[in-house]
């Protein structure tokens, strides 16, 4: 991939294609599978349900904590299908970015009337 911004632009394009094809109102899992397929068709490496390593005072407590998609080992994508994104959704993605030591994430809510209103960039300023 070129830059992180180029990668996020391509992921957004894939998400738009998924939304155009499926529309709003489905469960998050359906969008996740469709977006994985779309990214794969575009030749973009993607991992799903990636475990997030987390420790607390030297004890590993990361079991069960998973992010939706890790794209090209650089970009975290969190998917939602909710009536309205809440501040906690943004904070969740920011926490994942910090724990994974990544710079940029996309929070995508597919349950919207216009997908462009459902895409949010979240930056980890370290």
Image (cartoon, helix red, strand yellow):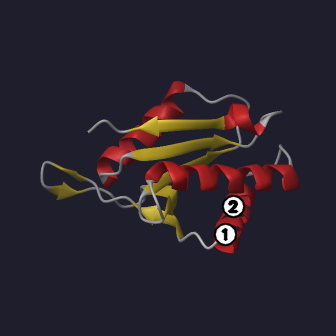
Whether 112 is drawn above or below 61: the answer is above
Q: Which residue is drawn at 48% across and 65% down?
A: 1
Q: Nearer the viewer, residue 64 or 125?
A: 125
Q: In the structure shown, which secondary structural element does the residue marked by tag 2 occupy?
A: helix
As drawn, the label of residue 42 is: 1
Please give left or right for residue 120 compared with residue 13 in the image. Answer: left
| Placement of 85 over or under 9, stated as above or below | above
* Percent of width and height locating residue 15: 70, 52
**Taking 63 as reference, is 79 left or right?**
right
Report the residue at 65% width, 73% height from top.
40
**Residue 61 lies in quadrant:** bottom left
Question: Could you tell me which quadrant the C terminus lies in?
Answer: top left
Which is more N-terminal, label 2 or label 1? 2
Which residue position is annotated with label 2? 35
Asked if residue 17 shows in the view, the reply is yes
Residue drawn at x 37%, y 41% is: 95
């Amino acid at each position: 991939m070129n830059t992180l911004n180029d990668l996020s632009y391509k992921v957004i394009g894939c998400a738009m294609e998924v939304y155009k094809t499926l529309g709003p109102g489905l469960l998050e899992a359906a969008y996740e599978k469709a977006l994985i397929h779309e990214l794969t068709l575009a030749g973009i490496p993607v991992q799903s349900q990636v475990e997030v390593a987390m420790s607390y005072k030297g004890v590993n407590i990361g079991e069960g904590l998973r992010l939706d998609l890790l794209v090209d080992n650089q970009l975290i994508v969190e998917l939602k299908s909710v009536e309205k994104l809440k501040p906690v959704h943004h904070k969740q993605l920011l926490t994942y970015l910090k724990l994974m030591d990544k710079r940029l994430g996309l929070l995508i809510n597919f349950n919207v009337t216009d997908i462009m209103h459902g895409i949010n960039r979240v930056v980890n300023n370290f």
